[in-house]
Amino acid sequence: MVRAVFAARLAVCCSISGPSAVEGKKKQIDRRLRRVILEDRAEQKQDQHPVKMPNIKVFSGSSHPDLTQRICERLQLDNSKAVLKKFSNKETNVEIVESVRGEDVFIIQSACGEVNDNLMELLIMINACKIASSSQVTAVIPCFPYARQDKKDRSRAPISAKLVANMLSVAGADHIITMDLHASQIQGFFDIPVDNLYAEPAILKYIRESIPEWKESVIVSPDAGGAKRVTSIADRLNVDFALIHKERKRANEVDNMTLVGNVKDKVAILVDDMVDTCGTICLAADKLIEAGAKRVYAFCVHGVLSGPALERLNKSAFEAVVVTNTIPQEDNMRKCPKIKCIDISMILAEAIRRTHNGESVSYLFSNVPM
């Protein structure tokens, strides 16, 4: 590119001054060319290795170190050192190895595996950083614990999501970054800022790139609670949507399902925020096939996949079940070839960068950072 520009300039010199003047200016142009090439290389090197963000520390809990590593690589930061261990009586012990005084601290911990242990570990890490004089502590919780216990749906039922919010605040968290809360109203449980990010832009990108007949698809919600999420995706894809009404008698068990909408000769795409034992979505897939759908896909942000989930998915009518890596999925993908995973580390990394630099995160609600 640089050589082409100087060649054009040389041609201009020829047309204006004649061949004799060109020889006199050739050495001068060559010197300028070499200088510009060196400057161009320096700029490229700077683009590849930007200056690291100052006064920031990113720590990983034990729940999802791979996601933290991806985020740190994206931000070109080192994963800050902390020693996480348990005493013989199973108490959690945390040691923050490096100084966090005056630092902007981000602690990444998801609700997976041993949820209670991981939550306690997060609380202790927050408190350890806070009393070590960090300037601010942000808890990055890709999958929020106890999010399904967000309301009092029966007598004497606890609102555990509110309890978790209180615990995070008391531990010393100044800010929460999470993704696709089961109910967005959980943000109101906090007295500190909460950024609830969405995987929807990444899901839309995946649908457009990986499902050839997406323009002839129908976006389906497996329950009434997900209607808003489904209509948003259907509107952005400019396709139809449908709804499955389910009657649930006990937790993780569905007694009856009714399809509202037409999926005949269409590609049905089920969308939900969380999939656990997979009983609901597998029954929904059978219902959609019975109603004439050509193929059925499922997109779920948080792939909990506990209990008989993998066995059910292997026997199901799904072409693919697409989840994100808010929860580790490597082992699940080995056991079930139908499971595909969308990497959302770039979304969380960009949210961390923007938060640290005092920038708006609204861009991430409708775009996937490159």
Image (cartoon, grey):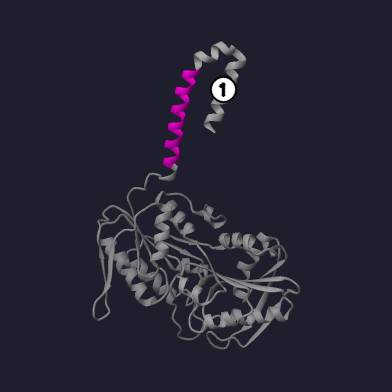
Residue 279 occupies which quadrant of the picture?
Answer: bottom right
Q: Residue at x 38, y 70 (%)?
A: 63
Report if residue 268 is visible in the image. yes
Q: Is residue 35 above or below residue 340?
A: above
Residue 278 occupies which quadrant of the picture?
Answer: bottom right
Please provide percent x and percent y for residue 7: 56, 25
Please provide percent x and percent y for residue 169: 36, 66
Magenta span includes 271: no
> Left or right: where does residue 239 sit relative to residue 145?
right
Q: Residue at x 41, y 55 (%)?
A: 73
Prevailing SS of the magenta stretch: helix
Closest to the observer, 3 or 197: 3
Report if residue 191 is visible in the image. no
Q: Is residue 323 above or below residue 360?
A: below
Q: Residue at x 47, y 66 (%)?
A: 187
Please provide percent x and percent y for residue 162: 43, 73
Q: Is residue 251 above or below residue 194?
A: below
Quadrant (top left/top right/bottom left/bottom right) for the N terminus = top right
- Per the image, the residue denoted by label 1 is 9
Crowdedness near tag 1: few (<14), some (14–19) or many (≥20) residues, C-alpha within 10 Å: few
Magenta-tinted stretch:
26-46
Magenta span includes 40: yes
Q: Residue at x 58, y 13 (%)?
A: 19
